Amino acid sequence: MPKRVVAAAVAPCAILTRPDGQAEALARSLNAQGIDTLEFPLLHIAAQADPVALTALDDALRSLTSYALAVFISPNAVTHALARLLHLSRQPRSQSSEEGSDGSDGSDGSDGGGLSGAGALWPAALPVAVVGPGSAQALADAGIAPPDHRVIVPPGGPEARFDSEALLAQLDLPALAGQRVLLVRGDGGRELLADTLRTSGAQLDVVSAYTRRAPEPDTAAWAALEARLVSPARCAWVLTSSEAVRHLATLLAARYGTRDGVHTPGTPQVLAQILAATCFTSHTRIADAARSAGFDRITQCAPGDENLLAALKTWADPIQVKHDDR
């Protein structure tokens, strides 16, 4: 069936807020359905650069065989840690932490070889636990997948939820008492997994493989966003991180002066248009953060890009039909 072409000026538009470089696949899928996209990243992800954190990460990666379980908190944790593992395999031990302190020289996985060699370096006897299918796919892309490796992931299905609580329900916590467990994440984040593993008696090592920070959109990014949201009924925010939503709230307050009802001159209408757009989220925590930021048209769909794509297509169909009937 030929793809329906919708003029960019009137097409429904999905505002994608994932970090730079992590929204392309979803954008292509949406574009194929006649949905325009605008990337407005709300998180910046970078390889860990702090020497102390890198030393802890390197020490853990060099002693993988001593762990009973490794837990990755996100796809970013998978890709940055495995890139570091590959980097370590290519460097003399005395040089690796110092040379990688700026996140360069291949430690970000951008050396052209990808992460496909990481599976050969991962101990076959070391099971891996991940919060969701995105992390499981990142492991599989690196060569860490059944049947050669045991990967623990919360089950899918209509009632699926991919979060720390769902992963903990899949772990045999009593069996981990007294065992070494490795938890790989970025700087900060929720403490539920770490606290529960420690309470269960695990000897937990927590290491940081990447950093997160709030980006600063430039003038062109704000102009593109405001131009699209002149017609908020045709726009939808795609919010996939509660931390990113909190960054958005801070950015909106700084630009439009929302605190205590005091606005920058001329901006109340623009802010109202931004907040009037529908939001699509995949978790209650993200929906709650969006509500706290001032959004009130919030649609929560099942986790996963396929479900997100289906929900956005359902939202966009009436807009596309209305345009086609003109």
Image: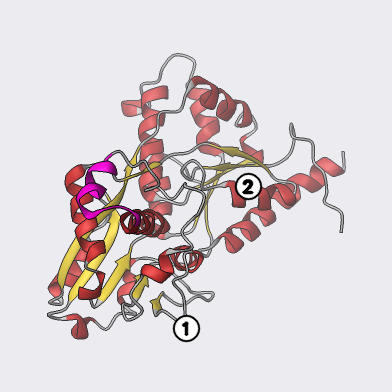
The answer to whether residue 49 is seen in the rendering is no
Horizontally, residue 259 falls left or right of residue 248, namely left
Q: Position of residue 316 (x, y in %)?
A: 70, 49
Asked whether disc 1 touches disc 2, contact meaning CB atoms under 8 Å apart, the reply is no
Amino acid type, residue under disc 2 in the picture = Ala
Q: Which mark is residue 147?
A: 1
Q: Of the two numbered discs 1 and 2 on the same chain, state the one appearing first in sequence.
A: 2
Quadrant housing residue 105: top left
Residue drawn at 21 percent across, 65 percent down:
194
Residue drawn at 57 percent across, 59 percent down:
305
The magenta-colored residue range is 90-101
Quarter holding the C terminus is: top right
Q: Is residue 102 above or below residue 153?
A: above
* Numbered disc 1: secondary structure: loop
Closer to us: 18 or 92:
92
Q: Position of residue 165 (x, y in %)?
A: 32, 70
Secondary structure mostly seen in the magenta stretch: helix
Closer to us: 174 or 15:
174
Q: Residue furthest front?
A: 92
Quadrant housing residue 200: bottom left
Residue carrying label 2: 27
Quarter holding the N terminus is: bottom right
Closer to us: 187 or 270:
187
Q: How is the image coloured?
A: secondary structure
Residue drawn at 80 percent across, 41 percent down:
6
Amino acid type, residue under disc 1 in the picture = Pro
